[in-house]
Amino acid sequence: MLKLDIISDPICPWCYIGKTRLFRALEARPDHPFTIEWHPFQLNPDMPEGGMDRATYLERKFGGKEGAVRAYLPVVEAAEDSGLTLDLEGIARTPNTLDAHRLIHWAGLEGRQTAVVHGLFAAYFEAGRDIGDPQVLADIAEGCGMDRAMTERLLATDADREEIRTRDAHARERGVTGVPTFVIANQAVVAGAQPAETWQQIIDDLQRQIASQAAGG
């Protein structure tokens, strides 16, 4: 098996699109060699802990609703092409994602990372839920088979906050400036939400290399 490290943020629409395209390729290549681990990257590391009103955030980042519409048009088109329906109008708040990344970290300890990552993406982009809210995070954890009471207790503490910040900083030190970023076997980097066909080609190439090495070629 080959390690596929995925660096992402659950409020990044391209990360959701990239995940969807990757997993479509994995479904088409069930004998793929990847074992997946998710890693933190905060698009807005200076976001207040309680998040920010979405309209205010868009005003500051894009100069208002019209600028946001222009910026998100390629996102909406790519999402639809990937079979996703994003309810961007339904997002009331842009959250600080530190706690969401803590949840992803804890899910990894239980082998539930991908399920939780998907739950976060769907909650934020399709249901308009505030994934900075501890109760929303507990709902997602419980829905993925994690212990709700334990999740609530952990979220009420500072557990692993510095761990997440350190891992985020490490990604930036390694040259990651945007997400999603995929790292194959700690060697090859694939940046951006690549089409499923690209991932299928990557998998096929890797399988040929693995077969050649096994045959002593």
Image (tube, helix red, strand yellow):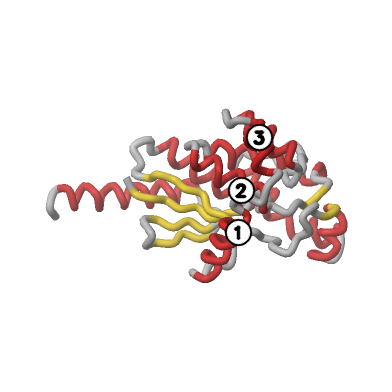
Label 2 or label 1, whichever comes before in sequence order? 2
Q: Which class describes the residues within 10 Å of circle 1: few (<14), some (14-19), or many (20+)?
A: few
Can you tell which quarter of the image residue 169 is in? Answer: bottom right
- Which residue occupies the foreground of this view, 149 or 141? 149
The residue wearing badge 3 is: 140
Callout 3 environment at 10 Å: few (<14), some (14 to 19), or many (20+)?
A: many
Up-down: is 206 above or below 127? below
Q: Which mark is residue 162?
A: 1
Q: Kindly report which numbered mark, 1 or 3, lies closer to the viewer in this rendering.
A: 1
Residue 151 image point, x, y percent: 64, 37
Which of pointers 2 and 1 indicates the residue nearer the eye? Answer: 1
Quadrant of the rendering where the N terminus is positioned: top left
Provide the secondary structure element on which disc 3 rests. Answer: helix
At a point 38% along the width and 60% down the height, the residue shown is 186
In percent of the image, x 34 and y 49: which residue is there?
Answer: 2
Q: Are marks 3 and 2 in contact (CB under 8 Å)?
A: no
Give the residue type that dot 3 points to. Ile
Q: Quadrant of residue 189?
A: bottom left
Query: Which-is-in-front pick, marks 3 and 2?
Result: 2
Q: Is residue 95 left or right of residue 122?
A: right
Q: Amino acid at mark 2?
A: Arg
Callout 1 amino acid: Glu
Judge left or right: residue 69 versus residue 17.
right
Rendered-image quadrant of the C terminus: bottom left
The residue labelled by disc 2 is 102
